[in-house]
Image: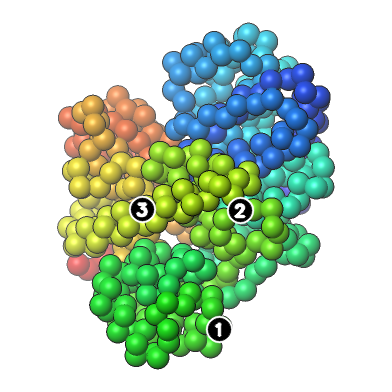
Amino acid sequence: MSRAELRMFQHATEKAAVFLKSKLDGNTRIKIISHMDADGIASAAILARCLYYYNVPFTVQFTLPLEPDKIAELAKEDHDMFVFLDQGSSQIEAIHKFILAKHANVLVIDHHPGLFIEHPNLVYLNPHTCGLNGGRDVSTSSSTYSVVEQIDLRFRALAGLAAAGAIGDRQEFLTGFTGINESLVKRAIELGLIYQSEGLKLVGRTMDPVVECLRLSTRPYIVGLSGNLGACRSLIDALGISHSSTLCDFGSDVERRLADAIFARVGPLATNEDFNRTLWGKLYATTTDDLAGPRDLREYATMLDACGNLGKPEVGFAVAVGDKNALTDALAVASSYREQMLKVLDGLVKKLGSFKVLSGFRYFYFGDTISPSLIGEALSLAIESGLLPTDKPVLGLVDAGENKIKISARSVPRLAMLGVDIGRALAEAAAKVGGHGSGHDVAAAARIPRERMDEFIDKLLQAFSETGGNPDTPEEPS
Ligand SMILES: [Mn+2]
């Protein structure tokens, strides 16, 4: 991130803050439309906390990015201002046509690429217009945080939520955060709002008995331990530590010994960089009492993500705005999500040898064995667990009902740096077969008519070679 880029982003943030601030007098009824994932939920909660403080009447709706006809319907609702969070950039045309045409005000805070058409009643904050990479440097939660922080410094206490959203969008890389996220987290650490330490990065480290924490581990998925209660018990017995304590009770010496025992257990994976850094590294915890829910921000992000992916975003939102009564529900959703994800990963691991390897990418068609809402996350987890090579992007295809196929694609920053943009490639190839695709350079999705799956694969091969998307690396010996 250059200084010019940072200055442009700050300028756009100030503009959004001035616009929002002018609508906080209580006379503007606001509708928030946000994305149904951890980043979208965290973003909506950050904005909602600000609106609660100023007694601004508002309603929230969580959805997948709205299609134009849904935006037309939305425009019929009676609100003075519409705020699109973690979506809106790729829907700007429909927003102009249906909402701005009615003289309603619109604020878009998003980090997806899109088309930016100016309008006097529209303000948008998008890192892509500032030369930043929305897929890596800044989440919608960190953008929304940057806006409310401009309005009043009291909202700085929400830094943990901003970081949780970025973690949910996988913008905390093996080497840490970058860009706006990095400076935000650094500042929050200096202010004592986030505590950073080092240890086993397993979800459940502050909540679950250590045996359960290992058994349910999908980030990383630990071959031989994940899903295997007996193996987890005997590993813990061998270390002579208590089954029922949580990881964070043990202290760093025991954590280190446990990490060594896990490395010894997984064989060659122990030297895999993805697996290594997914298992052990930086931990982030909130220090403020403001946030109900787990203190560990990775656990927090998982909880929000679980609520989004299992269709209960409002439960995660309730916790994130501070409703402690919703916490039991949110943790139950998180627990059921982790069990489901474990089963999905168990299934995926069995298919690792069956992925088809083409020049530009590798892929597998899972039929109806993996739910369309879980396939993308499953691929990310498999990569982070060192189970799938990252020399080229990976695609998972699944049945998505109504004779549609959903394609989830995952790549890594190193390939993006070489010019591989799976978001663009998926969008191009899907459009050519009557489907629709979008996303970032390292994570994207598409939906296409089922009968055109083979044609889609051909178009995608073309798209990858045309956009410089062929990583041009030698085939893996299989
Ligand atoms: Mn996002």
170 or 459, which is in the foreground? 170
Task: Tell me what residue is drawn at x 36 percent, y 29 percent.
Answer: 436
Task: Tell me what residue is drawn at x 37 percent, y 70 percent.
Answer: 212
State how far apart marks 1 and 2 are (Cα). Answer: 26 Å
Amino acid carrying mark 3 in the image: Ser
Residue identifier under label 3? 336
Residue identifier under label 1? 252
Q: Residues within 10 Å of mark 1 (few under 14, many from 20)?
A: some
Question: Along the polypeptide, which appears first: circle 2 or circle 3?
Answer: 2
Amino acid carrying mark 2 in the image: Ala
Percent x, y for residue 122?
Answer: 68, 22
Please say whether residue 181 is visible from this viewpoint.
Answer: no
State how the image is colored.
rainbow
The residue at label 2 has a CB less than 8 Å from ligand 1: no
Quarter of the figure with residue 145: top right
Percent x, y for residue 4?
Answer: 75, 47
Q: Are marks 1 and 3 in contact (CB under 8 Å)?
A: no
315 or 137, which is in the foreground? 315
Amino acid carrying mark 1 in the image: Ser
Judged left or right of residue 92, residue 213 is left
* Disc 1, SS: helix
Q: Residues within 10 Å of mark 2 (few under 14, many from 20)?
A: some
Q: Is residue 311 above or below residue 192?
A: above
Task: Tell me what residue is drawn at x 63 percent, y 34 percent.
Answer: 109
State how far apart marks 2 and 3 are (Cα). Answer: 20 Å
* Disc 3, SS: helix
